[in-house]
Amino acid sequence: MSVPSHLHRLDAIQEQCLHQLGLTDTKACVEHNFAPPSVRRAIGILGFRHNRVLGICHPGLREALPFEIQDGMQWHDKA
């Protein structure tokens, strides 16, 4: 069984529980910081990639996942 199908099953269980509590997915996420497992996984992957680009990760990951700024690619100047 693949990871997405496991997350789909967990999402469905959480959705049933929220329905019984009278909450929507959106309200549970925004007001109670209780996002579905698939959303938490996506946020975690984005955070992992962000840390790799910034270079604040384990040195082994820097070697395994090299990152180079390509021509024309610019960093923003906003703080």
Image (cartoon, rainbow, N blue to C red):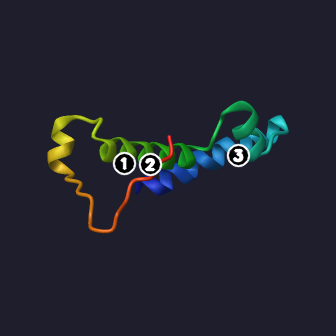
Image coordinates of residue 9 in percent, x first then y, are 57, 50
Q: What amino acid is found at the position of numbered circle 3 in the picture?
A: Glu
Residue on which disc 3 sits = 15
Q: Residue at x 43, y 42 (%)?
A: 47
Image coordinates of residue 58 in percent, x first then y, are 22, 34
Q: Residue at x 21, y 51 (%)?
A: 65
Q: Secondary structure at mark 2?
A: helix
Q: Residue at x 37, y 59 (%)?
A: 74
Question: Which disc, if any, is residue 49?
Answer: 1
In-image side of 16 versus 45 (left or right): right
For the residues carrying marks 2 and 3, which lies nearer the camera in this image? 2
Residue extending farthest to the front is 77
Image coordinates of residue 44 in percent, x first then y, are 45, 42
Question: The N terminus is located in which quarter?
Answer: bottom left
Q: CA distance from mark 1 to mark 3?
A: 28 Å
For the residues carrying marks 1 and 3, which lies nearer the camera in this image? 1
Q: What amino acid is found at the position of numbered circle 2 in the picture?
A: Leu
Q: Secondary structure at mark 1?
A: helix
Q: Is residue 40 above or below residue 73?
A: above
Residue on which disc 2 sits = 46
Crowd band around label 1 with a 10 angstrom C-alpha radius: few (<14), some (14–19), many (20+): few
